[in-house]
Amino acid sequence: MQRRTGLTAIALIGSLTLAACSGGGTPSADGPVELTMWSWATLQKVADIWNADHPDIKVTVQEQGGGDELVTKVITAAKAGDGPDLVQAEYQMIPTLVSNDVLADITEFAGGAKDKFTENVWKQVTLDSAVYAIPQDTAPLAFYYREDLFTQLGLEVPTTWTEFADVARQIKQKDPNRALTTFSSNDAGLFAGLTQQAGATWWSASGDTWKVAIDVEASRKVATFWGDLVAEGVIDNQPMYTPAWNKALNDGMQIAWVSAVWAPGVLVTSAPDTKGKWRMAPLPQWSAGSNTTGSWGGSTTGITAKAAKNGRAKAAAEFATWLNTDPKAVAALVKEAGVYPAATAAQTSGALTTPEFFPNQPDFYRQAAELAKGTAAASWGPNVNVAYGTFKDAFGKAATEKSPFPAALKAVQDATVADMKKNGFKIEG
Amino acid sequence: MSALLVGPRVKPSVSARRTSWLPTFLLLLGAVYCLIPVLWVVMAATKSRSELFSTFTFLPGNGLWTNLSELTAYRDGVYWLWMLNSGLYAGVGALLSAAVSALSGYALAKYSFPGRGVIFTVILAGVLMPPIALAVPQYLLLAKVDLAGSYWSVLLPSILSPYGIYLARVYAAAAVPDEVLEAARVDGARDLRLFTSIAFPMMRPGLVTVFLFQFVAIWNNFLLPYVMLADDETFPVTVGLYSLLQQGASKPALYTLVITGALLSIIPLIALFLGLQRYWRVDLLTGAVKS
């Protein structure tokens, strides 16, 4: 009896298919090139459009969760010679992936796509004049505010950071329970975007030498500005994306949010009762009349070194270019994955319809396209995770203790430089 | 588990029956501490998207059915495929693991052969090694033999459980008396028959424990399948739910689906525990030898 159950169990596993690792397939005359793509967005339906039109190149999307874990996973897979042909990667992760030999140089296949994007976006997929990915979506920063509460409290929408600080003080005077917004030490990406607006470029490379410029005048200006507001007590110092933060947004205890163009998608879940009450305005400026913004997020489609090794880089680059620039593809991308496309033509093409959560702002995306034009340059380094991790600790402490932020900024710079030196990168200065 | 196996040692007396308030209070506190998160999941799963963060935490909402049907509809029911995968990984993995543990535990406990001490020490060292630290090396090894990404890549590392072997050895040493084995040998039983007919039934409560521990460990495992598997149709439920949570900032987060999915995914574990509990008590052969 016992033996029989044992045998059944063995037979059961024997019948399991040995689904071999991610799609093999080499270009040959007798079958299509098979490409696999790792992504955190729901892209299979978009790939299906491509597959219907291109019988010679078949793309399968394998949905993975995003975030730092995906980066780790792709790097591990690449070390084992495994992994996908295409991978979705955030802009700031490209240098990390390149220095780990995950991404392939696709300059010869993708150079033609350059004109479809703004120069500053294209720079972010270029490292030392080699192209490593095709931009997918961008996330220019904007100022979101509760239109109804601004009217009720008699507030003007700030156009400069000085006005922003004034509005924050006015709110505290009129209703001490409310705050304009919060400074969140959990979101280094937002702070990085704000320093881009002020003109900072945290990393830059020439040849094989890196320059780390996190603790520079432009970043210090941003850090001091927010640190002073926190110390003064006119804005909150609690992190974003917590249940308490959701509640504060939903109940109108925080009445504005500096966020990116994807904010409507977050507000739907965070502040469900406030539909139609929010409005997007340009990010406050450092000097009146200018139109500059930073970005917070956005991603690209990278082609892996594995694809290049197996002679599939050309096919993969073709697909990546189609996915992110072809009008039909971008329209599907907007519909299925809800992204804000990086391709400039797509930003005004009508593929983007008014966000459901902002019925009061029918020209939301036309305004967003205006903002996007002013997106400042950004450039990333091979250890963004270290910088962001240190940011969380150092700024978290400073925000809680309401101590000056520039010291925290210096800590981020020092930790980033030390880590790069330890890993054998040449550092200028 | 041990509480069920070990009977009361002290005869109940008047003093022992008096309620001791401090331990009772501490245990209650511990129970509340453990159960509150469970209660949170149960309550949150009943809330609709608009209720999730805005209503009182421990009040039920009225979105359970919407959540369930949305979860089932998501990508044509991929959630249920993930549940099936989890069942497969955990069920087959735990079964094989229990079988391997039974054989090796029994051999280590009842046979003396050169190297026994060394093998047992190595296994003991394995108990101390956290499985998480092994996931990446295991991936690199399996990728070398082209198994990464297959069902085997999750099953194979789960089969050998040092803790299971250790437990089976300790249990075999205690529950299978040498006298019974000798008696069977005298009656002409060979080694295989000794194991299948004598030792295995006696070890069953211990093996059920090994099976349960391993089932829960595989069911809840995240890192190993996350590293190993690429195709989202081979994901277990842990990795699947994670991919739902991390879909980038541009889409509304699918919290309601993830919470409902998490609630459903603990139901099989609870059912398994309740179903197998009785085996822990069935220890019929303990009285086979007079001591």
Image (tube, grey):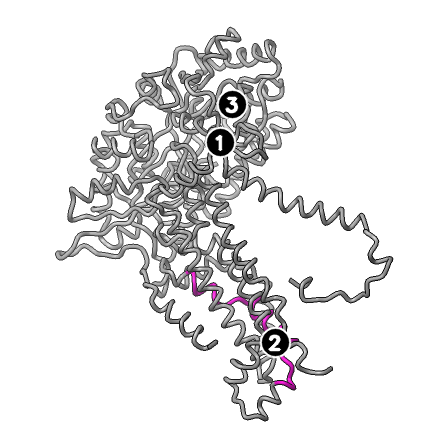
Give coordinates of residue A365: x percent, y percent. 32, 21
Question: Earlier along the polypeptide chain: callout 3 or callout 1?
Answer: 1
The reply to whether residue A104 is in sight is no
Residue A333 placement: quadrant:
top left
Q: Chain of mark 2?
A: B
Residue for badge 3: A249
Residue in the image at 15% along x and 42% along y = A53
Q: Residue under label 2, please give it.
A: B172
Q: Which residue is mark 1?
A: A214
Quadrant in the rendering for residue A247: top right
Q: Subunit of mark 1?
A: A
Query: Could you tell me residue A337's position as x and y percent?
Result: 33, 35
Callout count: 3
**Magenta region:** B154-180
In this rendering, is residue A197 above or below B242? above
Q: Amino acid at mark 3?
A: Leu
**Secondary structure of the residue carrying numbered label 2:** helix
Picture quarter with the C terminus of chain B: bottom right
Say which of A249 and B67 sits in front. B67
**Magenta region, main secondary structure:** helix
Badge 2 and badge 1 both on one subunit? no
Quarter of the rendering containing residue B87: bottom left
